[in-house]
Image (cartoon, helix red, strand yellow):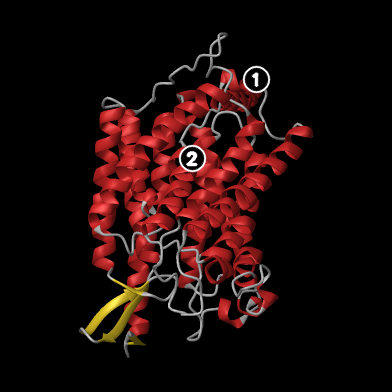
Amino acid sequence: MNEIQALAFDKTITDIYYLVSILFLLFLPIGTIISIYGLSRPRHSTSTIVMLFMSLPVIILSTYLFGWAFHFTFSSGPGITGNFQNISHAVPWSELMAPNLKSSTLNLVIFFIFSWSIVVILGAASIERIKFGAFIILSILLGSVFWPIASAWSWTIKSWMVEIFGYHDAYGAGAIHAVLGGFTLGVLTQLKHRVIKFTNQQQSRSIVPSNPLMLLLGRIFMTLGLIGILLAANFPILEIKNTEGIFFETANVYGAPISLSGSIYNFMLALSGGLLMSYIISKGDLYWMFSGGIIGIVSISAGCDYYFPLQSFLISLVTTFIVYKSYHWLEEKFKFDDAIGAISIHGFAGFWGLLIAGIVLWGYPSSTNPEFVSINPFGQFAGAIILFWILGFVPGYLTAKILNFFNLLRISETTEIAGKDVMSLRNHYFQEQDIQNAEKAIVKAQITNENE
């Protein structure tokens, strides 16, 4: 039996630990933006960067006003509403949201970055055709409503899915990646593909990255950002006593003591498995080779804290193969145009990772509470369905459908072909012309005065 207690200097060490986690986490949204800059065509690239970056202040504000409160409201099961027991801790006027010795707003900062990362990947999947206003609306719903609910239901010590289903998801395979993938699937169902993506015979065109170096750099940054998720999803630093001795380690989001170094080692093996499989199956394609590393990491995120290293490697190999085939099947069969691969690389990898964890870890404790159901295939399957379809696909599909009905979802075909940047430059041209005309009028007036 493990006896766990926090160290006397736990507050200082924890703050330093989370600051390092924040540094790594920032690589995820920044890397996504850099990747999409390398993928998007030049006449759209600047507008895309502006759109993705402008989601940051929107998400910070919406999460502060109600997203953080949603997370606390739904986080104490077994009821799906959580009985609103902890909402007073997270409303904007709470003293715990202010800078005082009792507050721990670093957790809120981490939550901001999680939310921003999710909505940036959503925006990256729908580049070159979504309207700015529609993206902001979808970002608020995903980043400050449905992702907080998903994390509360499945990714806290008191989550009802853990208690009733025996659900286990150490590093957000469901709470982050499956929800994101499902929501993106719902949005792209209504948004449709770029006009140039498919030929008249409905065959897919390969849109060559405009800047392969930026794509490569962005994918490397995204991989570092996933390591940030691993660091941020732990509770450091704990003194754990058991029959084997005394250990100074961390605990997962469910309060179970784990080996941080072991989890990182599993991440490294999953990264290598994804890279190897994607390199082989894509025949060295730059985009897919580095995407495979991300798939590998996402695929073992659900059970990374318990897996044996060889299991992580094998799971990443199998999942990367499945996800690669799934991406092309979606594209060929249903004509989806997912620029960053959010549906497959994040959604499908997270979904399959949850199911595999239910089989491999069958019978393992889902949390430290002995009354909670143990990990089992049904619990993982039920959790994956809820997160991907109910909290992901359904709200994404319905919101996009409403926006599309009012013609608020997609830019015009003319703007898409000409490019958002070109349209912006046209406005700058007219402004510059106005300035030049005004200057000419001033000069002409001065010459006239001098002649007189």
Q: Quadrant of residue 432?
A: top right
Relative to 229, 186 lies left or right:
right
Name the residue: 49% across, 40% down.
342
Tag 1: residue type? Glu
What residue would you read off at disc 1? 413
What residue would you read off at disc 2? 342
Question: What crowding class fits label 1: few (fewer than 14 Cα within 10 Å), some (14-19), or many (20 or more)?
Answer: few
In the displayed orientation, state which residue is furthest to the right: 406
Which of the two marks, 1 or 2, is nearer to us in this view? Answer: 2
Which quadrant: the C terminus?
A: top right
Q: Which one is in front, 341 or 324?
A: 324
The reply to whether callout 1 and callout 2 are in contact (CB within 8 Å) is: no
Q: CA distance from mark 1 to mark 2?
A: 24 Å
Which quadrant: the N terminus?
A: bottom left
Whichever of callouts 1 and 2 sits on the residue coming sooner in the sequence is 2
Q: Which one is in front, 229 or 332?
A: 332
Q: 357 above or below 369?
A: above
Q: 271 above or below 191?
A: below
Q: 337 above or below 102?
A: above
Q: 336 above or below 132?
A: above
- Percent across and percent down for residue 43 are 50, 24
Q: Which one is in front, 274 or 45?
A: 274
Name the residue: 40% across, 36% down.
322
Tag 2: residue type? Ala
> Does residue 220 show up?
no
Name the residue: 25% across, 30% down.
280
